[in-house]
Image (cartoon, rainbow, N blue to C red):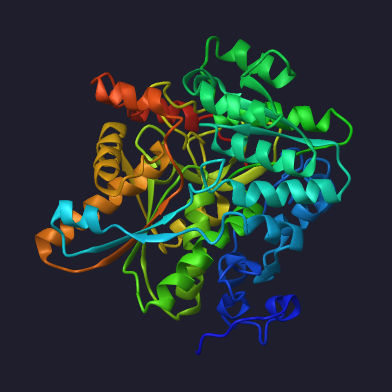
Amino acid sequence: MEHETANTAENAVKPKCDRIPYKIYLAEDELPKAWYNVRADMKNKPAPLLNPATKQPVTAEELGHVFCDELVKQELDDTTPLIPIPAEVYDFYKMYRPSPLVRAYFLEKALKTPAKIYYKFEGNNTSGSHKLNSAIAQAYYAKKQGLKGVTTETGAGQWGTALSMACAFFGLDCHVYMVKCSYEQKPFRREVMRTYGADVTPSPSTTTEAGRRILEQFPGTTGSLGCAISEAVEAAVTHEGYRYVLGSVLSQVLLHQSIIGLETQTALRKYGIRPDIIIGCAGGGSNLGGLISPFMGEKLRGEADYRIIAVEPASCPSLTRGKFAYDFCDTGRICPLAKMYTLGCGFIPSANHAGGLRYHGMSSILSQLYHDGLMEAVSVEQTSVFAAAKTFARTEGILPAPESSHAIRAAIDEAEKCRETGEAKTIVFGLTGTGYFDMVAYQKFNDGEMGDYIPTDAELEKSFATLPDMD
């Protein structure tokens, strides 16, 4: 199909038929006018969220007590392939998008590989990561609904930073529950949030019933995203005029993040480049899902085939060692049940783990795609991740975030395989953000004080035993 562009907003969001690829909806500046919903092309749809009390699919009304109304619609929409980007969000995107797709010539040279390596760099905004793509959308819908503010959780701090920036833009209150070990390890990211006006609380805390209950059950815990989610949801539902927003896992978030993959695919097509391997780091799934969605759409429609690799930390290996089952989305067990690859909602990653990617489960969309054999997953140890980060920094001049460095590790491994076989494969990976607020972790690695922790089978079995009974 010839590449077309849309000159008006009307043309940008009205498909000419049900299954024309999204690329005709690109503006002249190559910034997409609509998000792509990969669920529309999935034969096996993600299993619905369930009410934990009734075990029945949650309704829009039930979700509306927690999320903004428009986000509820997006969360439950399994059929609409293209959802228009609101004008206010589109204008904000233009401050930092399209983000660059860069060929890593110097990394290729250092590896002496025939492979061609490209990375989509999402760190060229003040928040320092891809998280702003969804934060600004969610803040917009909250403002449009007339809310006072939002609550959320954050792991390494990228999401909290992005949301605080988005809330400042729209004049919303922002309350962030930050995983305690990250709160202590990453004080500068915390201070960026506060500079943008956010209230930041280390989680678990004594300010919520869920936090107090978790502290009683796990004394001295360093926290997890599951803990922080419980606190943020409780804070939202107990305060008038507030809603909860989430930076990963949910389908609405992967929808917003599809802008990453849409731009990547457009740039590759513009220069006649066809990727063989697409790689993304995986925690809850926002970056990975956003990067691969348009490519996965092609794969699902039978238009192309790609090898897609999810890379997760060995200390929190939900895809590679988890169970595909319904589980609570939070440690406090107050959120809906989601069918996903999970380690159990009570699983708390080791404090030795020096980055984000700390969630016990994986996006239901990505879990279903993985379960259907449409993508692969690998887990990597953090010392090897930081070694890859160091190589990338020394060759490409960007200090990568620890999360991004999981994808770098896998990209380097695949490029080295190409060196051994002589195959000139094209590799694309997502560079989710920069690591300039992660210097404590880099210091530990440089000083030889960083170790690797891998949960034992016994530890995982103990966590799996807490999965809800679905009979």
Q: Position of residue 448 (x, y in %)?
A: 23, 21
Q: Position of residue 41 (x, y in %)?
A: 57, 72
Image height check: is 420 above or below 82? Answer: above
At 55% from the left edge and 14% from the top edge, which residue is drawn? 218
At 27% from the left edge and 18% from the top edge, which residue is drawn? 449
Q: Residue furthest bottom?
A: 2
Q: Nearer the viewer, residue 326 or 224?
A: 224
Left or right: 423, with 443 as reference point:
left
Image height check: is 323 above or below 225? Answer: below
How many labels sit on residues?
Answer: 0
Residue 468 in view in this figure: no
Query: Which quadrant would residue 379 be assigned to in this image?
Result: top left
Residue 164 in view in this figure: yes
Left or right: 425, with 359 as reference point:
left
Q: Position of residue 184 (x, y in %)?
A: 51, 17
Q: Nearer the viewer, residue 22 or 133?
A: 133
At 59% from the left edge and 32% from the top edge, which residue is drawn? 154
Image height check: is 348 above or below 89? Answer: above
Where does the C terminus fall, quadrant-wise?
A: top right
At 62% from the left edge and 74% from the top edge, which residue is drawn? 27
Query: Which quadrant would residue 164 be assigned to in this image?
Result: top right
